[in-house]
C-alpha cells in the first residue's frame, strides 16, 4: 500500500499500479519504459467493465529509465473536496514525464492527466501519437455511444449542448468530436463514461481531428492541448486530462455531475447579483449618485451583490464618444494607471459607494479584464490590483472578461492568477461568452460561469431561450456552477411587436423562477424597474433566499419538456431526503401536465408549495407529479 484516504487506496508492485475505492478498481502498467492503461473492475456489478488496453501511450521524449511514485491526499489547496492523488514521475536524460491519477471516495470515476518537463534543448518531431491521452477497451464490440458536445462563445451560439447517439460499425474505425461520451454495451444495464477534462471544443487548444476514436471496442481519447513542436525547457507543461467512470446507464451522468460538484466547494449557497450592463447603457450611467440608487434598489429587492461593469476604470480613451473602442489586452503597456478608478466619473473615488453598500447590506463587485498580452505575462500585477481592491474596499466579487487563452503557457499563467485570487477569498465570475476560455468542466474550482449576454435592445433576449440553455446545460453541468440572467422585460417593448415570446409577456417572478436553480443575475438597472416588477422580485427572492443554501447543495435535474416557449418544463433539485420542484408552464393552454421523474418512483412525497404566481395544484403519481 502506497497510499490510502477513506475508502480510496493505491498499491504498486512490479510495475503495476492498482488503485480503487468501494465502487471500482483500475490498474496501470509501468513496465519496460512504457505505460499501458489497464483494466477496470466494477465492484457493484462484480464484472470487468474494461480490459487491458492493447497499445501503450507514446511518450514524446521516449521511454522512461526510472520512475518515482508519490501519493497524497489532495483538495486543490482547499478549493475542492479531498481526493487521493497518485503522481508517477518517469525520468530519462531528456525529460521528466509525469502521469497523475485522481480518485474520490465512493465515486465510480478515475481521472488522469500527463505533464512533461523538458530538461534539454533536444527536439522531438511533431507526432499525433503524442496527443493520445487515454485508452480504454470494452469486452465487446457491440455498443451504442452517446456523444455530448458542449459549446461556449454564446455571443455567437444559442445551443450550448448537442447530444447525438450512434451505434458504431463493429470492427471499423469511427471518430467523434465531443466532450463527454457515454458508451452503453448492447444488452447491458451498465455504461462507461469518458469525459475530457479540457475546455470545450470551441476553446480547445490544438484540437485534434477527433476527440474520440473507436476501433473494435478500443476507445482512444485525443487532445492534450500541447504543441509538442514548441515545448519550453525546464518548464512543466500540463496536458488536458480524462475522466473514466462506470455505473448504471440511467444514473451515470448524474454521478458525473456529483463528481464535478466535489471538485468545487464554492460559496456554499447561491447568490443574486445585479449588473447594470444589461440595459445596454454601458458606462454612460456610471456615477456615484446612480450607483447609490442601484444599491438602494438592490437592498429593497434582496440582491446580494451589485457589480460595477466596464467603465469604472480610468483606461486610456479620453473621448467619451470613443469609449467602447478601448483596448482588450496590453493594458499595462498602454498605461500604468489603466486600472485606477476614473475620477471624472467618480470624483470622490469608490469610498462613498463602498460605505453606502455597507449601510445597505449589499456587497460590491467589479468587472475586470485580465491582461492576455504575452500569455498573461503580467498576471501577478493583475492579482495585486484585485487584491488591493479586496484589501482597501472589501470587494471580492470580480467578473473576469475578455480572456484569450492562446497556449499552454497562457493556461498556466491564467490558472496561477485565478488560483491565487481564489485562495485570497475572491469570488470570480468567469465570462464564457467569447474568446478561448476554460469553459464548463475544466478547472471548475475557480469560479461561477457567466453564461450569456442577451439584450432587449437588439432583440436577443427571449426568456424561454435563456431557460432552454440552463435546462440543457444542467443535464451534465451542476447548475450552481452557472450564472443566468433576467433582463428588464419592459424595455424596448416596441421592438418585439406581437412576438408571442416577447419578454414583456412574462411576469418577473416567473423570470426569476426560471433561473433560480443557478445564480440569478439581474441584468438591468434596478432603480429603473417598474414598481410592480421590483415588488414581485422582492417577494420571490425573500422566499428563495431561505432555501438558497439547500439549492446549492442539491443535485439539479431538468424535468418535463425541453423549453421552447410552449412547453411544460422545470427542474427537480434533490437534496438527500428533501428536494425542490420548479414547475414552469410556458405559454400553452394545457391546464395539466404529468412530469415523469424515475428517481422518485415508488416514493411517497410530502409536498408544500413555497411560491406560485397562479392557481396551482400538485397531484403525486407513481414516479412523478401532475
Image: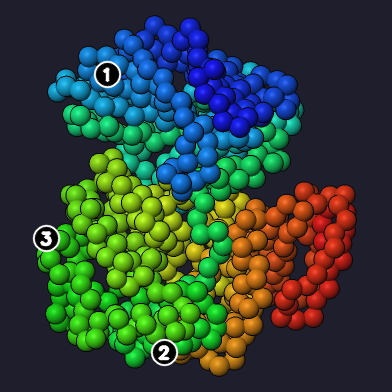
Residue 326 visible? no
Counting residues from the N terminus, which is met first, the one under dot 3 or under dot 2?
2
Compared across the picture, whether 478 is left or right of 68 comes to right
Looking at the image, is mark 2 or mark 1 nearer the viewer? 2
Name the residue: 62% across, 56% down: 553
The C terminus lies in quadrant: bottom right
Name the residue: 70% across, 55% down: 575
Dot 2, crowdedness within 10 Å: few (<14), some or many (≥20)?
A: some
Q: Quadrant of residue 141?
A: top right
Query: Callout 1: helix, strand or loop?
Result: loop
Dot 1, crowdedness within 10 Å: few (<14), some or many (≥20)?
A: many
Q: CA distance from mark 3 to mark 2?
A: 36 Å
Compared across the picture, whether 486 is left or right of 577 comes to left
Query: Callout 2: helix, strand or loop?
Result: helix
Of the pair 185 and 422, the residue shown nearer to us: 422
Of the pair 209 and 338, the residue shown nearer to us: 338
Q: Quadrant of residue 527?
A: bottom left
Q: Tally the numbered discs.
A: 3
- Residue at far bottom of view: 531
Query: Callout 3: helix, strand or loop?
Result: helix
Residue with the mark numbered 1: 61
Disc on res. 293: 2
Of the pair 311 and 461, the residue shown nearer to us: 311
**Image height check: is 225 above or below 127?**
below
Residue with the mark numbered 3: 333
Mark 2 and mark 1 residues within 8 Å of each other at the beta carbon: no
Name the residue: 83% across, 53% down: 623
Q: CA distance from mark 1 to mark 3?
A: 38 Å
Counting residues from the N terminus, which is met first, the one under dot 2 or under dot 1?
1
Counting residues from the N terminus, which is met first, the one under dot 1 or under dot 3?
1
- Image x and y of residue 62, in percent: 29, 14
Amino acid at each position: 500500500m502506497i497510499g490510502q484516504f477513506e475508502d480510496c487506496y493505491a498499491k504498486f508492485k512490479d510495475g503495476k499500479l492498482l488503485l480503487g475505492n468501494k465502487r471500482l478498481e483500475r490498474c496501470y502498467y509501468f513496465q519496460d519504459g512504457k505505460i499501458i492503461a489497464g483494466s477496470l473492475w466494477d465492484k457493484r456489478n462484480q464484472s470487468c467493465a474494461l480490459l487491458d488496453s492493447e497499445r501503450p501511450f507514446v511518450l514524446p521524449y521516449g521511454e522512461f529509465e526510472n520512475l518515482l511514485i508519490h501519493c497524497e491526499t489532495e483538495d486543490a489547496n482547499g478549493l475542492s473536496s479531498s481526493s487521493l492523488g497518485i503522481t508517477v514521475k518517469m525520468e530519462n536524460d531528456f525529460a521528466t514525464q509525469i502521469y497523475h491519477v485522481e480518485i474520490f471516495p465512493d465515486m465510480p470515476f478515475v481521472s488522469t492527466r500527463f505533464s512533461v518537463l523538458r530538461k534539454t534543448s533536444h527536439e522531438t518531431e511533431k507526432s499525433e501519437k503524442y496527443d493520445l491521452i487515454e485508452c480504454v477497451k470494452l469486452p465487446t464490440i457491440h455498443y451504442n455511444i452517446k456523444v455530448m458536445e458542449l459549446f461556449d462563445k454564446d455571443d455567437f451560439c444559442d445551443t450550448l449542448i448537442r447530444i447525438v447517439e450512434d451505434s458504431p460499425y463493429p470492427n471499423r474505425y469511427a471518430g467523434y468530436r465531443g466532450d463527454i461520451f457515454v458508451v452503453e454495451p448492447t444488452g447491458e444495464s451498465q455504461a462507461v463514461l469518458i469525459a475530457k477534462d479540457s475546455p470545450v471544443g470551441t476553446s480547445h487548444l490544438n484540437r485534434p481531428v477527433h476527440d474520440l476514436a473507436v476501433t473494435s471496442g478500443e476507445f482512444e481519447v485525443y487532445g492534450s492541448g500541447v504543441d509538442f513542436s514548441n515545448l519550453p525547457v525546464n518548464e512543466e507543461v500540463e496536458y488536458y486530462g480524462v475522466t473514466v467512470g462506470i455505473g448504471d446507464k440511467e444514473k451515470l451522468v448524474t454521478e458525473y455531475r456529483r463528481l464535478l460538484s466535489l471538485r468545487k466547494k464554492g460559496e456554499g449557497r447561491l447568490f443574486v447579483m445585479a449588473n447594470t450592463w444589461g440595459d445596454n447603457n454601458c458606462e454612460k450611467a456610471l456615477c456615484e449618485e446612480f450607483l447609490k440608487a442601484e444599491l438602494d434598489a438592490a437592498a429593497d429587492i434582496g440582491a446580494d451583490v451589485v457589480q460595477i461593469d466596464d467603465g469604472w476604470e480610468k483606461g486610456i480613451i479620453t473621448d467619451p464618444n470613443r469609449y467602447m473602442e478601448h483596448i482588450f489586452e496590453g493594458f499595462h503597456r498602454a498605461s500604468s494607471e489603466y486600472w485606477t478608478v476614473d475620477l471624472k466619473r467618480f470624483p470622490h473615488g469608490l469610498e462613498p459607494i463602498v460605505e453606502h453598500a455597507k449601510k445597505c447590506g449589499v456587497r460590491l463587485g467589479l468587472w475586470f479584464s485580465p491582461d492576455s498580452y504575452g500569455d498573461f505575462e503580467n498576471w501577478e500585477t493583475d492579482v495585486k490590483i484585485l487584491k488591493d481592491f479586496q484589501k482597501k474596499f472589501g470587494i471580492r466579487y470580480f467578473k473576469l472578461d475578455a480572456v484569450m487563452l492562446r497556449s499552454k503557457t497562457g493556461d498556466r499563467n491564467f490558472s496561477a492568477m485565478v488560483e491565487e485570487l481564489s485562495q485570497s477569498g475572491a469570488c470570480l465570475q468567469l465570462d464564457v461568452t467569447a474568446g478561448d476560455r476554460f469553459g464548463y468542466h475544466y478547472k471548475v474550482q475557480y469560479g461561477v460561469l457567466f453564461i450569456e449576454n442577451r439584450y432587449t435592445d437588439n432583440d436577443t433576449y427571449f426568456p424561454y431561450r435563456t431557460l432552454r440553455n440552463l435546462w440543457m446545460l444542467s443535464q451534465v453541468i451542476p447548475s450552481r456552477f452557472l450564472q443566468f440572467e433576467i433582463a428588464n422585460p419592459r424595455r424596448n417593448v416596441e421592438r418585439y411587436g406581437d412576438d408571442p415570446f416577447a419578454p414583456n409577456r412574462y411576469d418577473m417572478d416567473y423570470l426569476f423562477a426560471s433561473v433560480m436553480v443557478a445564480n440569478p443575475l439581474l441584468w438591468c438597472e434596478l432603480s429603473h424597474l417598474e414598481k410592480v416588477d421590483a415588488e414581485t422580485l422582492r417577494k420571490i427572492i425573500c422566499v428563495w433566499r431561505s432555501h438558497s443554501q439547500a439549492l446549492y447543495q442539491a443535485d439539479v435535474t431538468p424535468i418535463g419538456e425541453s423549453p421552447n416557449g410552449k412547453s411544460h418544463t422545470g427542474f427537480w433539485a434533490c437534496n438527500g431526503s428533501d428536494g425542490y420542484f420548479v414547475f414552469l408552464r410556458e405559454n400553452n393552454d394545457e391546464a395539466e401536465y404529468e412530469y415523469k421523474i424515475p428517481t422518485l418512483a415508488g416514493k411517497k412525497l410530502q409536498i408544500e408549495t413555497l411560491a406560485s404566481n397562479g392557481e396551482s395544484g400538485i397531484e403525486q403519481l407513481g414516479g412523478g407529479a401532475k
